[in-house]
């Protein structure tokens, strides 16, 4: 499988230390050369290594990350066949009615782990290629599942010239045993733990609460409509407050999320149920014993046997039992016709749980996504470049044309795709048409001024932009202001920490401080306006490659183009490369395109541009009514 040619040169003794490994001092006396990130140098005992090569923090990019995901997606069927037997698939018969669905459930869990391993080894491969290493290397990496590593190594899925020291293998073997044991313990006692928590009175089936719509809540998106709320579906016309139920079914990673969300829901008069507190505590333990406990015990032992055979599936086994029981308790108290989630797909288990009770599950992907890697030929054809969105099972996907097409190529099982357009571009559209004047005034921008809003993307490790590209971006915007006296600019970082993401002593910090000192530049992260609002009030939006802002702005009716500072994303398979005056790959093009969009392209020509390119490829409507189309799709 691997085309590497190398010589065994023990005298070289090369060590590669990955990112975010365990923070313990390493004995590296035998190694002549050590490659590591700056942050990992603390692991090296001083004076032992002859030569330390520091790998740049932005060495491993977003494209590398996606490439490793694609590699995992290509190989997942083979790995599944090697690791999983028919009897393992049968353990999920309590949840799914077809073998293919059980396989999807397992592959969804397995591909996540495989992708993580492939991402680590792709990093090592890139180091070997970049630094022209001809011999074998030892690679110290973070924890990965021991059994999976053994399978991948034995079946030649991993490069032969990258060796894992025995101490590291033992380390992640122990870690695997601890993690596996943790989920086995949870699985073993989960039905009884639920019983101990229950305090509720008996409920009769006829007292079930009825809802048309259920909304899955998750971290990072609340009820603030300006930031793309979870509650936009409620307009009190098509869908009223009493029609919808918000649920927290997957335990959030942010500690205060539940508290904050419950307070907001109560304030706004929304119905909300939290699986991890309200649902369990308020359930009657005698009803639980009578209706669910003994079946749960039977399922528990089947899943325990599976987790003993395949420890890598211990976490999946626990969540299968967890989700199954909690959804059974839910449907004992509620009936919901249709559930939907925004962006975050969640665990596929819950889709099967709600299907078993006659409810539909709908995925609303709110960002506009297009293929970042070339995947039109075998073996990459119709394989996923983003494993989080692969092996999903939904009744419907509601999104724009681009995203629905992308989801179709991600090894998913989605029954129906509905093109409703870009949902949160409605915010941009409505802000431009109804709130533009007031919002511009609130940040000191007169309507007569030419406002350009600039958005960067992720920077550094697994970032879209390298630090050099971010540096060029800062300098380009300063130069753009100096050469165009009529421009006013708002710059907003994608990362919430803004300029604080860069160390105080870094060159980037100084460059952006210099940019923000310009009298016609506003630091967007210090404003109270959300990014949709900053898009809607702009005369022109400039953003960076792979960002959904590229299309959200255009669909919302604001002139937009993309700036690729080093021309690294000038790829034939990116449809935007076919748009005229759209993808700027140098400062001269940036300046020329800004002038073109602002001063040469009239409104009628802009509408023609949208008709020819945006309506054809992305959003067939561009009318600010995607939210209503989604409500109609929910009720259809």
Image (cartoon, grey):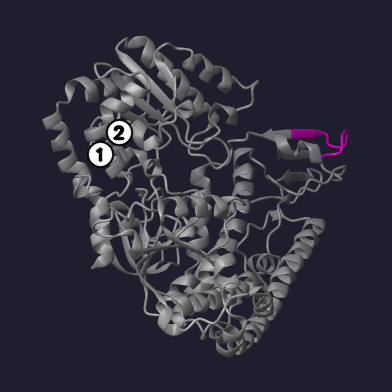
First in sequence: mark 1 vs mark 2: 1
Query: Residue at 50% across / 38% down in the picture?
Result: 458
* Left or right of 117, for residue 165: right
Q: Nearer the viewer, residue 23 or 444?
A: 444
State the SS at label 1.
helix
Quarter of the image that includes the N terminus: bottom right
Q: Is residue 470 above or below residue 232?
A: above
Q: Quadrant of residue 554?
A: top left
Mark 2 is surrounded, within 10 Å at the Cα level, by few (under 14), some (14 to 19) or many (20 or more) other residues, namely many
Residue 577 located left or right of residue 20: left
Estimate the spatial distance between the alpha carbons at disc 1 and disc 2, rounded to whole Å.
7 Å
- Assign a secondary structure to mark 2: helix
- Residue with the mark numbered 1: 429
Q: Position of residue 615 (x, y in %)?
A: 19, 46
Circles 1, 2 touching at the beta carbon (< 8 Å): yes
Where residue 279 appears, as percent x and y from the top left, is 54, 70
Tell me which segment is drawn in magenta.
Answer: 44-52
Please give left or right for residue 259 compared with residue 543 in the image: right
Position in image of residue 52 (x %, y %):
76, 34
Task: Please give the residue where the numbered disc 2 appears in the rendered image.
Answer: 536
Q: x%, y% of residue 488?
A: 34, 17
Magenta span dominant secondary structure? loop
Q: Residue at x 42, y 77 (%)?
A: 208
At x 41%, y 57%, the residue is: 270
Task: Report if residue 117 lies within the magenta region.
Answer: no
């Amino acid at each position: 499988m691997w085309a590497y040619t190398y010589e065994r040169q023990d005298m070289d003794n090369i060590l590669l230390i990955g990112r975010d490994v365990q923070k313990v001092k390493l004995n590296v006396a035998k190694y002549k050369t050590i490659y590591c990130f700056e942050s990992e140098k603390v692991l090296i005992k001083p004076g032992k290594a002859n030569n330390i090569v520091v790998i740049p923090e932005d060495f491993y990019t977003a494209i590398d990350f996606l490439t490793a995901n694609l590699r995992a997606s290509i190989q997942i069927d083979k790995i599944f066949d090697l690791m999983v037997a028919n009897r393992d698939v049968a353990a999920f018969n309590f949840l799914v009615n077809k073998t293919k669905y059980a396989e999807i459930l397992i592959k969804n869990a397995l591909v996540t782990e495989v992708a993580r391993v492939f991402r680590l080894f792709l990093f090592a491969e890139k180091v070997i290629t970049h630094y022209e290493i001809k011999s074998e290397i030892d690679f110290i990496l973070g924890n990965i599942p021991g059994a999976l590593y053994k399978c991948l190594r034995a079946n030649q899925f991993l490069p032969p010239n990258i060796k894992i020291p025995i101490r590291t293998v033992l380390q992640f073997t122990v870690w695997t045993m601890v993690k596996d044991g943790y989920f086995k313990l949870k699985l073993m006692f989960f039905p009884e733990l639920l019983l101990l928590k229950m305090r509720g009175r008996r409920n009769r089936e006829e007292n079930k609460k009825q809802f048309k719509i259920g909304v899955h809540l998750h971290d990072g998106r609340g009820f603030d409509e300006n930031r793309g709320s979870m509650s936009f579906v409620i307009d009190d016309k098509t869908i009223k407050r009493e029609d919808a139920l918000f649920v927290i079914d997957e335990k959030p990673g942010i500690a205060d999320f539940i508290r904050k969300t419950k307070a907001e829901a109560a304030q706004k008069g929304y119905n909300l149920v939290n699986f991890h507190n309200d649902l369990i505590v308020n359930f009657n333990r005698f009803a639980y014993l009578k209706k669910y406990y003994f079946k749960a015990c039977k399922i528990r032992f089947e899943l325990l046997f599976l987790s003993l055979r395949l420890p890598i599936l211990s976490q999946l086994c626990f969540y299968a039992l967890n989700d199954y029981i909690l959804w059974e308790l839910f449907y004992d108290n509620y009936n919901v016709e249709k559930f939907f989630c925004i962006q975050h797909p969640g665990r596929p288990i819950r889709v099967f749980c709600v299907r078993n009770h006659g409810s539909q599950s709908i995925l609303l992907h709110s960002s506009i996504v297009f293929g970042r890697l070339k995947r039109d030929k075998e073996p990459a054809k119709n394989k996923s470049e983003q494993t989080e969105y692969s092996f999903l099972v939904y009744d419907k996907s509601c999104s724009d044309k681009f995203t629905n097409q992308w989801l179709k190529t991600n090894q998913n099982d989605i029954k129906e795709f509905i093109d409703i357009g870009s949902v949160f571009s409605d915010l941009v559209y409505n802000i431009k048409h109804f709130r533009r004047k007031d919002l511009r005034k609130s940040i000191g921008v007169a309507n007569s001024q030419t406002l350009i809003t600039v958005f960067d993307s992720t920077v550094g490790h697994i970032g879209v932009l390298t630090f050099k590209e971010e540096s060029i971006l800062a300098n380009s915007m300063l130069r753009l202001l100096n050469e165009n006296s009529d421009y006013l600019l708002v710059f907003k970082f994608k990362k919430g920490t803004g300029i604080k993401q860069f160390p105080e002593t870094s060159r980037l910090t100084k460059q952006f401080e210099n940019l923000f000192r310009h009298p016609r530049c506003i630091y967007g992260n210090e404003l109270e306006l959300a990014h949709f609002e900053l898009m809607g009030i702009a005369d022109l939006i400039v953003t960076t490659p792979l960002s959904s802002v590229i299309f959200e702005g255009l669909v919302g009716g604001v002139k937009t183009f993309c700036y690729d500072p080093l021309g690294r994303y000038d790829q034939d398979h990116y449809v935007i490369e076919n748009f005229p005056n759209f993808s700027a790959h140098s400062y001269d093009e940036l300046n020329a395109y800004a002038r073109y969009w602002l001063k040469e392209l009239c409104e009628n020509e802009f509408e023609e541009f949208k008709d020819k390119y945006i309506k054809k490829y992305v959003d067939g409507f561009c009318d600010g009514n995607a939210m209503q189309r989604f409500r109609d799709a929910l009720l259809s």
